[in-house]
Image: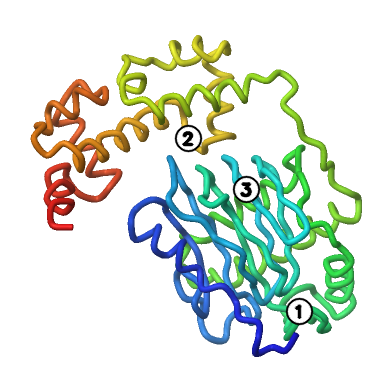
Amino acid sequence: MAKAQLEPDNCDPLIDAVERGEVTLAARSRGSYPGARIPKNALPGLRTIGYWDAVGPQSWGLPMHRNEGIEICYLLSGESSFATDFGEWNLRAGDITITRPWQRHRLGDPNIRPSKLFWMILDVEAHDERSTWDFADWIGPDVRSRRELLRVFRKNQCPHLSDRGHQLRPFMEQTCERMADDGPMVVAQLACSINALLLAIVERLSEGIDETSQDSSGFDQTIRQFFQGLESSIDKAAEPWSVAEMAKACRVGKSYLTTSCRHIFNATPAELLGRTRLNHARTLLSQRAETSITDIAMAVGFGSSQYFANCFRKQFGMTPQQFRDRTKVE
């Protein structure tokens, strides 16, 4: 396939979701990828690196697309659907995806689920799916090391792996922390983090990573179903839930519920409940123009209209009245 037929993804759905306030993003990028700009002559070949943090139901996804380099993603928390032309997987915390240059893949089915996901794309100068690969010379301390890194990545044909022991997680988290650093050493720090991350991944690929995953107790599925029930019923979400009562409804302890919610939904039970109530309120504000904002706040489970207004503004970037006024205009 000729280079002219292959164009990298422009990430418009993610960019639009950030503008709507559905997801927060921290990244450093070049080209059409979102995030703070990488200095022109710094870290050649690094197309984008960063993470998104999506809390609550999302209305966007990344349909089948291609990227010009090796893309590495690591799900830090939550869940997500991931697919290539050769299979589909339900990603959970600790799962890794490694896609090859110009390999078609998608995230979301069709929408992203609540999740915190780290990503990195490194251009290896592959003009099509059959080209040779080459890393920039800041990757690896010498030519021999770069060749070995490339050999392992090129040999790997599995787009989905699992890091169930979370041995790679510290490397991802450390690199995420660099996103907020604007100091004079940021480029050197990113280079060190990326090299350490690549080395750790290559070592794990060489050893083999456990690809088995199962929820033997079934409790996590019960928790998913419980919160899906809150999303589908305003009355159920408005009930005076405490964390202890939610845990009891799911037949688990409070600690297990909190830990499981962070892994499945990238949020605490209280955050999930609050976000669900706010989404129900947004629906009522657009559908029931005659109902007062205070009555809507009470209908979805908030005990105070002022607290409701503060939470709504924090979540959606506008007051309930501003949202209602905008909906009328549209």
Q: Position of residue 316 (x, y in %)?
A: 27, 47
As rendered, which of 37 and 101 lies closer to the eye? 101
Disc 2: which residue: 267
Whichever of callouts 2 and 3 sits on the residue coming sooner in the sequence is 3
Q: Position of residue 157 (x, y in %)?
A: 85, 62
Q: CA distance from mark 3 to mark 1?
A: 29 Å
Look at discs 3 and 1 and give the one toward the viewer.
3
Q: Position of residue 263 (x, y in %)?
A: 59, 34
Q: Residue at the location (30% across, 34% down)?
A: 280
Amino acid of disc 2: Ala
Check disc 3 and report its element: helix, strand or loop. Answer: strand
Amino acid of disc 3: Ser
Whichever of callouts 1 and 2 sits on the residue coming sooner in the sequence is 1
Disc 1: which residue: 135
User: Where 268 falls versus 195 (above or below)?
Assistant: above
Check disc 1 and report its element: helix, strand or loop. Answer: loop
Q: How many marks?
A: 3
Q: CA distance from mark 1 to mark 2?
A: 37 Å
Disc 3: which residue: 81
Q: Are marks 1 and 2 in contact (CB under 8 Å)?
A: no
Q: Residue at the location (48% across, 62% down)?
A: 181
Whichever of callouts 3 and 1 sits on the residue coming sooner in the sequence is 3
- The image quarter containing residue 56 is top left
